[in-house]
Each structure stands twice: as structure tokens, then as C-alpha cells.
Image: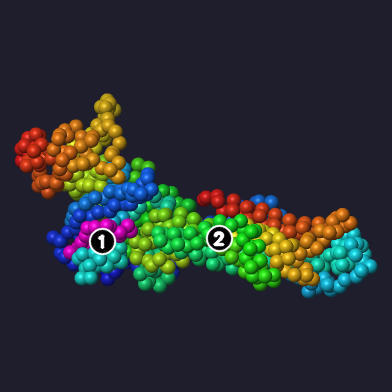
Amino acid sequence: MTDQTLSLPLTERPAAIRPSTSYWSGVRRRLARDPVTMICAAILLVILAAVIFAPLLFPLDPYKTSMIRRLKPPGTPGFLLGTDELGRDMLARLIHGGRLSLFMGFAPVLVATCIGATLGIIAGYAGGAVNMGIMRIMDVFYAFPSVLLAVAISGALGPGIINGLFALTLVFIPPITRVAESVTTQIRAQDFVDAARATGASATRIVTGHVLSNVAGPILVYAAGLISVSIIIASGLSFLGLGVSPPTPEWGLMLSAMRQAIYVAPVNAVLPGAMIFIVSICFNMMSDGVRSAMDVRA
Amino acid sequence: MTEAIRQPDIGGPAQPMLIVRDLQRHFVIRGQTRRRKDVVRAVDGVTFEVAKGETLGVVGESGCGKSTTARLLMHLTPPDRGEIILDGEKVGDPRGVSVRDLRRSVQMVFQDSFASLNPRLTICDSVAFGLRVNGQPATTARLNADAMLRMVGLTPETFSDRYPHELSGGQRQRVNIARALAMSPRVLILDEAVSALDKSVEAQVLNLLLELKERLTLTYLFISHDLAVVRYVSDRVVVMYLGKIVEVGPVGAIYDRPHHPYTRALLASRLSMNPKQRISAPPLTGDPPNPIDPPSGCRFRTRCPIAEAVCALAEPRLARVDAAHDVACHACDAGSGHTLARLTGMEGA
């Protein structure tokens, strides 16, 4: 080696001889090879697309009632999935209801992830008294079963979509904080964080430059798993009359209204429940798949 | 690196690079009972000096406080007590240097080459991080990082955009060295930096370190449990036992005329190159005592072959036995009252 290497080469950086395989490209490759995850993702995509675009493309009226056409079985001309107890088109109601149900699934988890991840990363990185303070407050919320907590909060606030969303968000903050805190604590103990501290970098700089990229994956996977829980709890709230109020279509509410008709038209009554089931199981399987694709090292 | 970035020699060649006085760190851990708080005396009053341009080896068995000392020197773990003087300037003192400046002047290479690199960053970005933190724009930092990689023997064309998991242990450790040197430090702490590598790679990395030391006029603090490697690289050696320094001296004196019974036992535990010369009896028996509750007086007395009543009463001081060779043992300290004291003292003279 000569002293030449010490001077700064002010030329352009040479390109790599062989493109390197990044962590995320490896994850993508493993995901593509996992049929279960891919099928679940496809089902979710179809449902999402239908829920978003179908009302824009086809005339679907989820509110039009008809006393003559009550509880028609699926396959009735004009009513692909039959009608409900007031003669409303099931397909239209499922699609419109899906908008609300999926929104109630995503929105609280999204907000809770932003708040929970921030709190968890702060607690995990700062450690000591800060960690103690944040995590003990979370433990108080954690002590209640999540469904009970959601019911209690929205019961106290009264029925309505906004109150339901608020209750759900509050329910999801503690578990996300906990996951964020535990992964951050693990990363914090790694030598590369000490090496970064040794350069004189500030805590904010280290968190954005080194911690965030390492904790984002696990937190997002965990949050994706919560979407199904959120849909179920939201449906549960509506079922109890606390979330959405009739006649607005929502899967949980529809299930609640149709349960009286379960002996007359079992297939119609089960449809909203089946939608909740399919969507939540797909979310669960998908987040499991992403988790295992991310677990593999090197 | 250009000369402009290099930090100037302030105190002149005679001023020690680092003076560490009475450095102490106790870790409070939750005790067995609820009320009691146990204290692990990881580093308990350590005092030493590192001269400019020398390599100070630090040896001792696991848990003796070698790594904690290193972390204290960089303020990665704040010390409870004691002072660190970097080239004549006290660290943390309003008139001295700040902790931030200390961290720039003193850099560290860790043992675990994989854990010390962010798995999500390319090699180049890892090396460039410190430069960017210290104000270099992204492109300049990356170019400088490439230059550092070339200096440690990794061609940037091949390695810059690689991720840590694509590299071998030796290559990763070279990256860690590049990252530390990118900050243009004056002191490099090598905390078991070559211990996890296999022998042939270890030799390559050691030679690289020695070459870089010459070229960049660095001062090394070389922490290792490998006595042979320490002998090969060090100018002076510090022997630690349970958070205290038991012996310090020039490498030749420590290895050829060890005074402290612990140093002797440590050296006797080395394997011989001659297969016929086997070690049958262990030079020391038992585990080191619990650092939560160390023995009174001399901490080594529970395993020491020449321990006497005085060893349980008073803690031995670091006494000079030879030129620049200090030993903390009553048997080497003439006024201590140990029956062997006079004898050993004469031997030293």
C-alpha cells in the first residue's frame, strides 16, 4: 500500500462490481416463494379493490329496502348474494360495509403505530426512568383485556364512529409501544449503537440513522397483525351497538342485525361474519409470512 | 485523510497521551432480597498512563474489568469517579476537553465484528456515518469512507456497497477498523478486536494494525485475553484482576520476570509449543471471587499460593519493583510485613 491511498480521491465513486443483495431484496425474494402469503395478499387485494372501486363503477344502493324481497337466498336475479332482513341488497351492503370495516381496521392501527412506535423507541433508547415511566403507564392499559377496554372506552364516550376509532386507537397503543420498546432495547445493546455514540452523534441522529431501520420491520409486522384484531373489535363494538349505528352498513352491525334471521336464511346471516373471518385470517397469515421472511438472517 | 483533519499534538512527546487516575465504576444490581442493593465493583480505582505512540496491552481473565475500563475511557459508560486526562487536558473539565472531543480523539474497535456493524447499512454508509455526523456532506463522506476502506485493504469497488452479512469476519473487522480510523483518532482502543478471528486472519489483521499505527502515528490500548498476541504487539502491559491493576510494566519485564503471583499463574497457563511439555496441574484453581463481595485486603488472596495473614488485612498498593515495573502485592512490598517481602524485594533489586 502506498501513501496515495491516504489522499482524497476526488473522482466519482466507482460502481460496485456485482450489485449487492440488500436485506429487503432478500425479504422480497423469500416472500415471493411463499405461496400462502402470496394467496392471502391476493385475496386482500381483491377485497380492497372491490370495496374501493365497485361503488364507483356499479350502481349499488345499500339502503333501498323492500318488504316483498326480504331474506331472498343468494343467487336471486338482481341480488347476487340475496337480501337482508329489510330486503336490502346484501352484495351492496357488504361492499359498502367493507369500506367502513376496513377503515375501522386500518385507521386505528395506523395512528396507534405512529404514537406507540414513537413512545416505545423513546422508552427503549432512553432506558432508565423514562422507560419506567412510559412502560408502567402502558402496563395500566395492558392490564385490561383489549375488547373489554374498547367496550369500556366507547361505552363511556357513547356510540359513534369517531368514538369507536378513538377507543380502538387507545387500545392498540400499549401493545405496539411494548413491541417497539423491546426491539429498541435489543438494538440499543448492539455494539454498532455504541460505535455510533463514539462518533459523537446525538441520540436523535442515532435513532434516525441506526435504530429506526432496524426496528421498523418488526413493529410494522406486528401492527399488520393487529389490523385483523381491529376489524374484529370494531365489528364487535357495532354488534353491541357502540360503534356504527344503523342503517349504516358495517360488517359487525350487519352480523348483529341478521342474527335473528339465522334459522330462516342461514347463508345470508353468515355472510358478514364470513367476510370478517376471511379478511382477518388473511391479514394474520400475511403478517406471519412477512415475519418469517424477515427472520431469516443472511 | 489530509493533514488538516489530523488532530494536533498538544502536549509534546513527553506528555502522556492518556492519564487515567483512580477510575471507578460500580454497577448497582438488584440483590437477592428486596431491600439489599448489590454493587458489582467492575472497575475499582484504576490508575495508569499511556505514552504517545506506545501500545499498552491489558490482560486478565473474563470479568476482570478490561472491557468496562475501555468503555469508561470513551465515556460510553460514565465513570462514577476518577479522571481521564487526554494529552494534558482533563476530560469533562470546563478548561479541558469535552466528552465529544474525547470520543473523536479516542476510537474503539469492538470484539464482535457482526454486532458492531448495522446490518441495514452498506459498509460505506457505516464508515461514512461518523464523518457525516461531524459535518461532512454526504458525497464527501462517502468518498472519504471509500478511502478509509482502501486503507484497511478492502477495495471500495468490491466492498463499498456490500452489507455486513456478505463479508467474512476478518473483512468485517477491517471495516470496523476503517470506521474507527475515519474519525482520525489519536488513540485506538482494541477491545478483543482480533480474538474472534481465526488464527491466520488474526495475524493479517494484527499486521494491518501495526502498519496503520506506524503510518498514522497512533497510540493503541490493546485489550485481550490472548497472552501471546499481547506480547507480540505491546510495549507495556497492564495485568488486571477483579477490577484492579495487579501489575504493570514493560512487556519484557512482565513476561520474563513476573512478580505478582496472579501474573505468574496467568503466564504459567499458556500452552507450550513443545507437545511433550504438557500442563498437568492447573496453575490456579477455582473461579475468581464474586465481584459483588470481593475478599478483604488483597483480592487475589483466596487463590494465592503465598497468601498470609497480612493479605486479608490490608489492600496492597502498587509498589515499584523495577524500572517502570509496579506490582500490587504485599510479598513485593518491603514494608508490608509479608514474610517473603524482603526476599522478593532483594530479587528485584
Nearer to me, B51 or A126: A126
How many numbered tags mark residues here?
A: 2
Whether B77 is among the magenta residues is yes
- List x then y, in percent, for residue A261: 86, 59
Distance, label 1 to label 2, CA atoms, is 51 Å
> Are there few (<14), some (14-19), or many (20+) residues within 10 Å of tag 1?
many
The answer to whether residue B85 is seen in the rendering is yes
Q: Residues in magenta?
A: B73-88
Q: Which label sits on residue A141?
A: 2
- List x then y, in percent, for residue B193: 33, 50
Residue in the picture at 82% in, 68% down: A92
- List x then y, in percent, for residue B257: 14, 39
> Are there few (<14), some (14-19), or many (20+) residues within 10 Å of tag 2?
some
Whether B85 is among the magenta residues is yes
Which residue does the numbered mark 1 point to in the structure image? Answer: B186
Nearer to me, A175 or B341: A175
